[in-house]
Image (cartoon, rainbow, N blue to C red):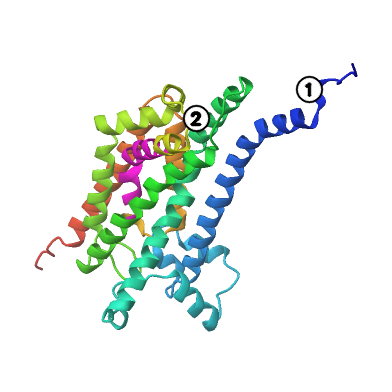
Amino acid sequence: MADTGDQTTTPLALAARLYRVRPRVLAITAILVFAALGWVYLGLMVAAATQATHALGPGMGFIDLVSTGRADAISRALLAALCRPSFGEPAVDTAFGGWIANVALTCLMWSAMAFAMMLPTAAPMILTYTDIAETAEDTRERTVSPLVLAAGYMTVWLGFAVPATLLQHGLMRLALVDPGLVSASALFSGAIFIGAGAYQFSPLKHACVALCQRPFPYLLSNWSTEPAAVFRLGLRQGLYCLGCCWAMMLVMFAVGVMNVVWMAAMGVVMAVEKSSSTTRFSRVVGSVFIAIGAVFVVSSVVAHWPTPLR
């Protein structure tokens, strides 16, 4: 009988090894690519703003400092048509078709924020899944691509874009957010910060952040080799993440919805929070938010305090 050789060096065995590595590489690549696309779109959205960048919220003056120039009128008009919602502009809002287009662009903006801010924070959970999958493959168990899990997770945050869009539209109608998507009231900004800070101390927040911090037990106990079940697993993880982070996402209404500096900062805060092993960091963030909110409220009260008669 002819010697079949070392089976571990056959093309099939080498392909199997490659397949064991590929899910993790695929997951990391997908996270980087989709998060980058989200940031690119948000950058184009900022470039499309007709007002000075520093008017888009606190910290955005930094963009003006590092900017080497402004887009010409034609480029700016094209960017505005593709990337900039126009809620609050009467010439657009009078046409129902224009209103629908603005709703779609605003929803796209919040969707881009979800990819830019939330998908990177899910990286530990998704990579934990790939680790379990690679272990399962060692026992020749069938596994499901981590992209299915990520798709379920992102479905929740893309769904969040819809109520966020409607809320933004409502706030603009109430004149609490101006056409530049910046808070028009220090008192309103203070209320958002204080509310988000108070939520950081709530039992629901702590329950959700605990599941985000330690995904391994949950993923292992709910392991499945069926794509539909893995997608639902991603949905549940997305819901836990939504319960953890929705209040911090709404802070964008206080600092400027198009404020990419605060988007990046909040993304880092949420990533650090999910990487912690306790709720201590969540409480620190809550305390900082409440303090910031108090400053907004005091500044609003002082600004409207009656001037004493001389």
Q: Residue at x 61, y 36 (%)?
A: 23
Q: Which residues are magenta?
A: 234-253
Q: Residue at x 51, y 35 (%)?
A: 126
Q: Which mark is residue 225?
A: 2
Does residue 262 appear in this view? no
Residue 105 part of the magenta segment: no
Magenta-highlighted stretch: main secondary structure? Answer: helix
> Would residue 236 appear left or right of 128 to someone viewing this image?
left
Mark pair 1, 2: CA separation? 25 Å
Q: Is residue 106 or residue 129 the one in the foreground? A: 129
Does residue 300 appear in this view? yes
Q: Residue at x 34, y 45 (%)?
A: 248
Q: Is residue 114 above or below residue 170?
A: above
Q: Is residue 14 or residue 310 the one in the foreground? A: 14
Q: Residues within 10 Å of mark 2 (few under 14, many from 20)?
A: some
The residue where tag 1 is placed is 8
